[in-house]
Image (cartoon, rainbow, N blue to C red):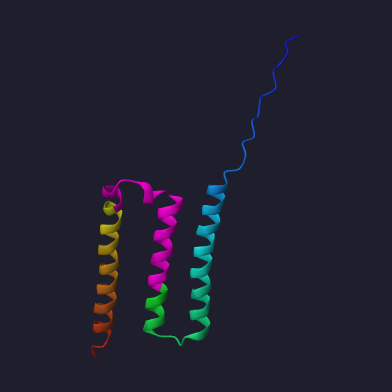
Amino acid sequence: MSHTQEPQVTVLPPDKEKIKKLWTVAGILGAITALEFLIAFTMPHGTLKTAIFVGMTIVKAAYIVGEFMHLKYEAKVLLWSILIPMVFIVWMLVAFVYEGMKFSEINF
């Protein structure tokens, strides 16, 4: 008869600092989302509302990437290698929308 040994499980006490940090991050993201809802239901539709939503979405995405993907704690070169192409992509999208609006005003 062979005896199998039960695996030993060690339960560590919860790290209160990590839990506090998670609640802080959740609170900040919740506050930004609540502000988005407030703007969505109180402002009239238009370019300003769209610009605010795009800006807030970029802020939330950057915060999520910085905290949960730990990019905030990485080397600055890695951070800039991600942010600089993002700036050019946003610039490209704005330029395409501007040119598309300019082109749609031309009457054939």
* Residue 71 point in image, percent of width and height: 37, 50
Quadrant into which the N terminus falls: top right
Q: Given the current orientation, which residue lies at the most extreme front position?
A: 17
Dominant SS of magenta comes to helix
Tell me where residue 102 sits by quadrant: bottom left
Q: Nearer the viewer, residue 98 or 61?
A: 61
Q: Which residue is pictured at 40% across the width and 85% down the height?
A: 46
What stretch of residues is rendered in magenta?
54-79
Left or right position of 58 against 23? left
Q: Find out whether residue 86 is within the magenta segment.
A: no
Image-based side of 30 in relation to 3, left or right: left
Q: Nearer the viewer, residue 11 or 92?
A: 11
| Quadrant in which the C terminus appears | bottom left
| Residue 41 place in picture, x, y as percent | 53, 83
Residue 58: % across, % down: 38, 66
Q: Position of residue 45 (x, y in %)?
A: 44, 86
71 to 12, vertically: above or below: below
Q: How many marks?
A: 0
Q: Residue at x 26, y 48 (%)?
A: 77
Residue sitting at the far bottom? 107
Residue 78 in magenta?
yes
| 100 vs 29: above or below | below
Q: Residue lying at the far top in this picture: please name it.
A: 1
What residue is shown at x 70% (from left), y 16% (from top)?
A: 4
In terms of depth relative to the viewer, which is nearer, 38 or 106? 38
